[in-house]
Amino acid sequence: MIGRPTKRVSINRHGKKELEYLARQKRKTRSVAFRAQVILKCSEDRTDSEVAGLLRTSNSTVGFWRKRFLERGIEGLFDEPRAGAPRQMDDERIEEVVTRTLESTPQGATHWSTRQMARKLQLRHRHGQGHRALLSQASQSRVPCVPGAG
């Protein structure tokens, strides 16, 4: 049975290089890397079902990212801002927390607790906002979390 025809994804050489670069960035931006892989597979004239099977995801996920890429280009692969309070840490500070967490351990311990990391990086908190709230932004950036640590 044949479904609706999929819209063709065509990318130029520069776009392909940028997508390939994003697809390799699995440590920093796992979700964007996955979306770039979806688009690269779609550009090989594959159906949503074929891409979904190759990447072990659903047809609707492939269709969503195909459509968004066709509408917005590579910028469409990145997350949109979400509702809620504005971030207290900038991108550089979040990257510093992620890098330190992944590439080092505190003296005499096997992993960083949120308190140790906050002390080490001298993170200050506002009234009513603890160190965990400050570091939660970094944890949303895929920092490993150890239950009960802190």
Image: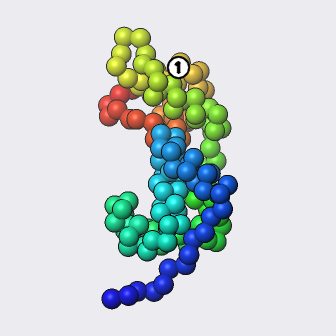
- Describe the element under mark 1 as helix, strand or loop: helix
Above or below 40: residue 147: above
Coloring applied to the structure: rainbow
Q: Quadrant of residue 143?
A: top left
The quarter in which the C terminus is drawn is top left
- Which residue is label 1 attached to? 119
* Residue at far top of view: 108
The percent coordinates of residue 85 (x first, y second) are: 61, 50
Q: Please say whether residue 14 is visible from this viewpoint.
A: yes
Q: Amino acid at mark 1?
A: Arg
Q: Quadrant of residue 123?
A: top right
Query: Which residue is nearer to you in this view: 120 or 20?
Result: 20
Q: Residue at x 52, y 29 (%)?
A: 99
The quarter in which the N terminus is drawn is bottom left
Query: Which residue is nearer to you in this view: 10 or 74?
Result: 10
* 97 with respect to 144 (left or right): right
Mark 1 Cα within 10 Å, few/some/many (few <14, many 20+)? few
Q: How many circles with numbers are drawn on the protein?
A: 1
Q: Please say whether residue 80 is visible from this viewpoint.
A: no
Q: Residue at x 35, y 28 (%)?
A: 149
Above or below 36: residue 136: above
